[in-house]
Structure formats: structure tokens, C-alpha cells
Amino acid sequence: MINNPNFQKDSQRVGFKNHEFKKLAGLFSWGATHKVLYDISVDVDFEDNLATFTYHQSNSYTPFLTFMIRQVGPRTTMYEVWKEGKGRITKSGMFERSFERLQTEVHSLVEN
């Protein structure tokens, strides 16, 4: 095995990051403050390399919006947003793009 410290120093950590978790939790807090979101559930399946953040609008706990994080390769993570009644509304390899769509959906609840 070749140990190349320059490679390790320059390569970014892949996968779901702490600040991304905080953004998803913060969006729930914002939605709950505006009384459009009731609860959030987080599920992690290590065998399938899948994590889901499900946002609920009522105490019936039917999923309204689901943000999925799936590791599809050794250095590739995909982010998806699913909406009740519509199915998948976005899929991207970039967290920010999928998060923006999720944020748009939550903000549209306040406007309606």
C-alpha cells in the first residue's frame, strides 16, 4: 500500500456531513414554528447505506416530505426528495440542490 499524505490532505470527506444534518433539522424547526410541520422522523439503514428524514404535517404520521440520502458508490452520495401524492420530485448528487427543493416545498406551505 502506498501512503500519499498529499492525496489524503486534498481529498474531501464524502457522504452526509454534520452541517447538512443541521440544515435539515433547522428547516423542520422553521416549519414547526410556522405551524406547517408537526414532527420529523429520522431512519438510518446501515445495510442499505440509506438515511431518511421524513417530515410530517399532522399527528397521523403520514409522510408528507421525505429527504433521502443514499450512498451509491464508494465516493458518491445521492440526495432525493419525495412528496406524498407526487413521488420523487428531485434527485441530485448535490446536497444543496435537493435541499433547496425541500426548502421550497416547506416555504410554499406557509404561503398557502
Image: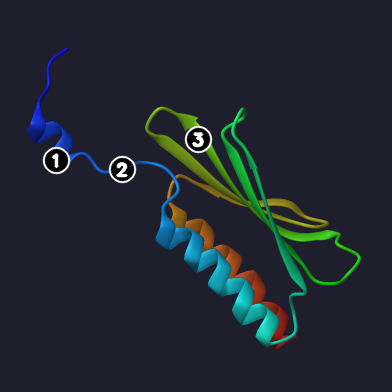
Q: Is residue 41 visible?
A: yes
Q: CA distance from mark 2 to mark 1?
A: 10 Å
Earlier-in-chain disc, 3 versus 2: 2
**Where residue 34 sits in the image (x, y, percent)?**
69, 87
Report whether 101 appears left or right of 55.
left
Mark 3 vs mark 2, foreground winner is 2
**Where residue 19 sits in the image (x, y, percent)?**
41, 62
Report whether 22 appears left or right of 105.
left
Q: Residue at x 66, y 79 (%)?
A: 31
Using a 10 Å C-alpha cutoff, classify the residue at mark 3 as few (fewer than 14 neighbours), some (14 to 19) or many (20 or more).
some
52 w.r.t. 5: above or below: below
**Where residue 98 sits in the image (x, y, percent)?**
52, 57
- Which residue lies under the disc numbered 1? 9
Q: Residue at x 60, y 81 (%)?
A: 30
Q: CA distance from mark 1 to mark 3?
A: 22 Å
**Where residue 59 sits in the image (x, y, percent)?**
88, 70
Q: Secondary structure at mark 2?
A: loop
- Quadrant in which residue 10 is drawn: top left
91 w.r.t. 83: above or below: above
Instruction: Give residue 71's mark.
Output: 3
- Quadrant in which residue 25 is drawn: bottom right
Earlier-in-chain disc, 1 versus 3: 1
Q: Secondary structure at mark 1?
A: helix
